[in-house]
Image: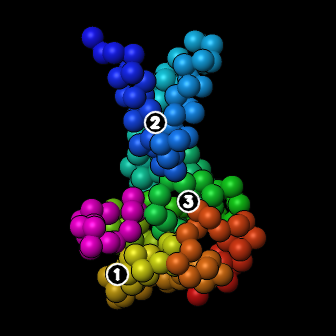
Amino acid sequence: MNSQNEILENLINNISKLPGIGKKSARRIAYYLINTPEHNAISTANSIIEAREKLGLCKECFNLSEDTICSVCSDRSRNKEAILVIENFHDLYLFEKLNIHKGVYHVLGGLLNPLDGIGPNALRLDELFNRVKEHNISELIIGLNHSIEGDSTSLYISNRLNSSGVKISRLASGIPVGGEIEYTDEITLRQAFENRK
Ligand SMILES: [Zn+2]
């Protein structure tokens, strides 16, 4: 049987693996979860299990979705010929919140980073190139961070689609150099989208 300390340390350890949570915050959250009325803690645990079980990836854009095709891709009012290429679900959420993109998305699932062993095959790049080829895509907007990884991923995409005839633009560098979309304020992100080149 686990000792009391082991149980607590195990909980803290698991919470500290969450993004942006250090050991100190993890300890605070662990104490909260133990002290809060039981139904609160159980409801949190159940939400995690339910999200893991029921949410999958959209077959077209790799957005999170309960169905095979996500709500963005199945929305008939969206322009299916314009794809905004983004790194992750969170960036998709930000662009949707701003309501500036009337087309659809493609979630790459990361950025090229050879030093960390992330090559083209680790991302959903082939899926993107197939989409462009098979679905009559006319415009590709690259909404990736202005970082070394974001730049090399953008360059890789542009090179591969060079002869495809698709119009490619990238969000203007209103996003600070080295800056991440996640931390860019709404006005700057809106301007970057409108001034894309
Ligand atoms: Zn989708």
Estimate the x, y position of residue 170 in percent, counting from the top left. Answer: 54, 81
Mark before the other along the chain sequence, 3 or 2: 2
Q: Residues within 10 Å of mark 3 (few under 14, many from 20)?
A: some
Which residue matches tag 1?
Answer: 156
Is there CB contact under 8 Å for labels 2 and 1? no
Main SS class of the magenta portion in the image: loop
- Secondary structure at badge 2 equals helix
What distance separates the C-alpha of mark 2 from that of mark 1? 36 Å
Give the side of residue 178 with respect to residue 62, left or right. right
Please identify, in this view, whether the residue under mark 2 or under mark 1 is nearer the observer.
2
Res 9 quadrant in image: top left
Mark before the other along the chain sequence, 2 or 1: 2
Which residue matches tag 3?
Answer: 91
Q: How many marks?
A: 3
Q: Amino acid at mark 3?
A: Asp
Q: Which residues are magenta?
A: 108-123
Estimate the x, y position of residue 197 in percent, counting from the top left. Answer: 58, 87
Residue at 33 percent across and 62 percent down: it is 124
**44 lies above or below 138:** above
Look at the image and tell me in which quarter the N terminus lies. top left
Residue at 69 percent across and 55 percent down: it is 97
Is there CB contact under 8 Å for labels 1 and 3? no
What distance separates the C-alpha of mark 3 from that of mark 2? 23 Å
Q: Amino acid at mark 1?
A: Tyr
Give the side of residue 36 with respect to residue 57, left or right. right
Which residue matches tag 2?
Answer: 15
